[in-house]
Image (spheres, grey):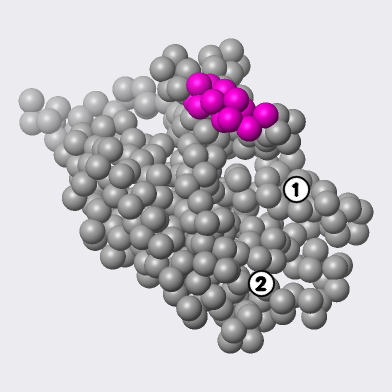
Amino acid sequence: MTDTLAHPITDSPAPPAVRVRRQTRSGAVALVVSILLLLALVTMPWWASQGLIRQIVELCCYIAIAQMWNLLAGYAGLVSVGQQAFMGVAAYFMFVLAQTWGINPFLAVVLCLLAPAVLAVPIYALLHRLDGPYFAIGTWVVAEVMRLATSNFAYVNAGAGMSLRVMSTYSADQRAIGVTLLCALMLLVTVGGSYWLLRSRYGLALTALRDNPVAAASQGVNVSRLRFMIFVAAAIGTGLAGAVYFMAQLRITPPSAFDPNWANIAIFIVMVGGIGSIEGVLIGALIYFFADRWFGDYGAIYLVVLGLLTLFMALFARGGLWGLLCKVVDAPWFPTRRTLLDSKG
């Protein structure tokens, strides 16, 4: 009996070796395609027209803004309709740095991100106690306050807005090269950064937070800290998109910088494409971009159709078009799941 206890049986079969698979064949293909698209973007000044470059810049800004809203609502559970506050603050600060203070405008795009990062802290401290629709209304109120304050602030020319006249010192080709490089950086920060975040240990916490905040907190997830981090990160990413967009426009006014339509665009893209997925953001952004080009002249009727489509998706297809596609084929472009495989898998 003693020998048996001291020397346990060792001839039992060992448990099968397993490994974790995080990349998929479709993900590898998507990674190659993404790199090629980024290379095409940064080389556009050598083969594309100025009009096409402006359109692609606009599309990239739609993708960045929507992905930041997707992080907020799709994972952190923070439904904001006032992200235009960070767009406007970053863009105006960029104009002040470049036009008023004489800093290189391309460097100013990076430096101006300090403004949305600093602004996000007191805003979150003020609004984080609100929940659901109250939080959404609070973000909209903050954005409107920023618009009204800017419209009466003489230092930024009040309601008349500002022009980025300093850009006239650069040739059209130089401006195109700078803007396309900034667009590539913006996509790497917003889309690439989101993908990296979702594949990290914070991604597991975000997934748990998205599914059930109470259960996530019971398992040790610091819900309040994680939501604060996502709120600040989304503010910075949205501000970067605003700075790049208005640099390409060369002019900014309070109604355009703090336009509530920016929030509407982000909500439409995410809800139609698929909330909680990077793939859905890309699909939704393309749909909105081409719909706006082809049907934007129809005015109010066009906006009503977009609203009804968003409502339909929210009621009957909450996963959006990407969710419907995933029911047919399982081929993620940006895989974040961890799949356990045996040694033979």
Q: Which residue does the numbered mark 1 point to in the structure image?
A: 55
- Magenta stretch holds residue 301: yes
Closer mark to the observer between disc 1 and disc 2? 2
Q: Is residue 245 above or below residue 167?
A: above
- Element class at badge 1: helix
- The answer to whether one can see residue 322 in this image is no
Return the residue nearer the eye: 315 or 236. Answer: 315
Task: Give the residue drawn at x 40%, y 50%.
Answer: 82
Q: Quadrant of the N terminus?
A: top left
Type of amino acid under label 2: Ser
Q: Position of residue 41 (x, y in %)?
A: 77, 52
Q: Which residue does the numbered mark 2 point to in the structure image?
A: 163
Q: Position of residue 192 (x, y in %)?
A: 58, 50
Task: Give the residue drawn at x 54%, y 75%.
Answer: 157
- Magenta stretch holds residue 252: no
- The answer to whether one can see residue 214 in this image is yes
